[in-house]
Amino acid sequence: MEKVMAISADQVKVLREATGAGMMDCKRALEATQGDVEKAKDWLRQKGIAKAGAKASRAARQGLVEAYIHHNGQVGVLVELNSESDFVARNQVFKGLAHEIALHVAAADPHYLRREDVPREVLDRERSIFEAQARDQRKPDAVIQKIVEGKLNDFFKREVLLDQPWTKDDKQSIEHLVKEAVAKLGENITISRFARFKVGEAPAG
């Protein structure tokens, strides 16, 4: 079995800045190309990811707010989805994406939009818990960091909207769902914010 090369955060950052692709896409590209940044750029372009990422620097100031109320009236969601033009904001693909994201938020209950939104103290607390668990299992120091990183990735998949597996197809994340729409519509598309309300539940934060 081919050994997967360990990729550093700095390598991921360099590739992300060069292509605009997401962190996990950059990591996968670097793993697939044994850490070669130039080959990783080509890998992302072949997958259509770098092309979508390149649009991410363009301002998305149009869009819509999608509202969803669950049939029992107990859960409601608001999602702001943005595009570059009003023309795309009125497109059925765009509207469908906004609706799917709202449905997903209702079902999956994410607490943060992106990884960068998770407060440092929350990450530090989770990391210390994962480290303590690994040490309790008497894992060697060399393995503990890998275990912690894996558990943090699982935490992001549970708590962060863009990282969450889509409830209708867990083989793709919400971030990939957005990138598919970018590729179809040819414009930068971003989720600006979301809010989820459940009867009897205190608001987050």
Image: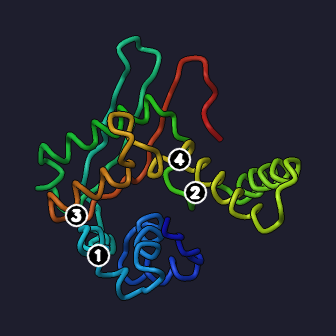
Q: Of the residues tagged 1 and 2, which is closer to the observer?
A: 1
Q: Residue furthest top?
A: 72
- Residues at circles 3 and 2 in contact by the CB criterion of under 8 Å: no
Query: In this figure, which residue is indicated by the disc labeled 1?
Result: 54
Mark 3–mark 1 distance (CA, rounded to whole Å): 14 Å
**Residue at 35% across / 14% down in the picture?**
71
Of mark 1 and mark 2, the one earlier in the sequence is 1
Mark 3–mark 2 distance (CA, rounded to whole Å): 23 Å
- Of residue 163 and residue 81, the one placed in the foreground of this image is 163
Of mark 3 and mark 2, the one earlier in the sequence is 3
Label 3 packing within 10 angstroms: few (<14), some (14-19), many (20+): some
Amino acid of disc 1: Ala
Q: Of the residues tagged 3 and 2, which is closer to the observer?
A: 2
**Residue at 23% across / 68% down in the picture?**
48
**Kind of element beneath mark 1:** helix
Q: Which mark is residue 157?
A: 4
Of mark 4 and mark 3, the one earlier in the sequence is 3
Q: Is residue 103 above or below residue 199?
A: below
**Kind of element beneath mark 2:** helix
Of mark 1 and mark 4, the one earlier in the sequence is 1
Amino acid of disc 4: Lys
User: Is the image coloured rainbow, by chain, by secondary structure, or in one colour?
Assistant: rainbow
- Of residue 12 and residue 7, the one placed in the foreground of this image is 7
Of mark 2 and mark 4, the one earlier in the sequence is 2
